[in-house]
Amino acid sequence: MQLKHNNGTPPVPLLIAGAHGTLGQALSRLCGVRGLHAVALSRADMDIADPESVAKALGKYRPWAVVNAAGYVRVDDAETDEERCFRENATGPAVLAAACAECDLPFLTFSSDLVFDGEQEGAYTESSAPNPLNVYGRSKLAGEQAVLAAYPAALVIRTSAFFSAWDKYNFVHFALEAGRNNQPFEAADDIRISPSYVPDLVNAALDLLLDEADGIWHLACPSGCTWAELARLAARMAGLSEEFIIPRPAAELGLAAARPRQSVLTSEKGMIQPSIDDALERCLAELGIATVPVPI
């Protein structure tokens, strides 16, 4: 899908929206590893909610596909910033999808486990009924619906809480930093999630894009854990005492946005990610931390 022009000019790029975010940076990095020519654009380069800005960027770069890694990510802030959240998470993806549909370009965007209300007993599949509890989740669901209405061939990937060694803005990094500094670290022990290891998530997303997959897919570590369990597992594998981790009910953490009691993701389409402990081991290795074998 990465074709050279007849005159020997560089290959047609994959266009990535959201150059400076966790996913945008990881996409650029792994495209380089995989030999995929990519161009990542910031909001200043392309405002995804502005049809004219999107058309201009598509005309300039003429990509073979577009990946939307941009969006509003501050779940609690969204409760008082609804207009901006919906602009970035619903309007923007819909504008990109419509532009890609018009140009017949493959399009990938990311959604969230927070489209679910947590009332289902088992893990959520792609066909489970969404019912978000907060503004962020509603914006993501609206984005999914608008994207697939504008472009049924689009690919929408739902995922969950990111962790990675490639930036410090994630739960695992904060937990390990607290442990190394002998600082208490509070974590919810009554909310179950499916952590998502960014390199695995991005590689699987690129595989699906190259395979011309469409519709909604779930990508996250299989099974699930509470936030407190994730912190304890990361600490044990890093050789740290778990005493610094303070489990708390979510209601005591002062979160502005309601969370589902569980939003564990699984896939009925067969795209299964590596286990949490396997992903954590590789994450810690990237950080230069020797792992300690622990019973799971």
Image: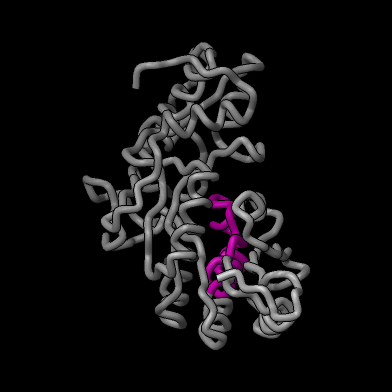
Visible residue check, residue 39: yes
Give the residue drawn at x 62%, y 14%. 182
Residue sitting at the far bottom: 102
Question: Where is residue 205 drawn, in percent x and y?
Answer: 48, 57
Residue 82 within the segment the image draws in magenta = yes
Give the residue drawn at x 51%, y 58%. 206
Chosen colour scheme: one colour
Residue 10 within the segment the image draws in magenta = no
Give the residue drawn at x 68%, y 70%. 11
The magenta stretch spans which residues? 68-93
Give the residue drawn at x 61%, y 30%. 286
Q: Is residue 291 above or below residue 277?
A: above
Q: Quadrant of residue 46?
A: bottom right
**Magenta residues, dominant SS class:** helix
Q: Quadrant of residue 287?
A: top right
Which of these two is toward me, 267 or 143? Answer: 267
Question: Where is residue 279 drawn, in percent x and y?
Answer: 47, 34
Visible residue check, residue 135: no
User: In the rendered view of the protein, which quadrant contains the C terminus?
Assistant: top left
Q: Is residue 206 left or right of residue 286?
A: left
Q: Quadrant of residue 125?
A: bottom left
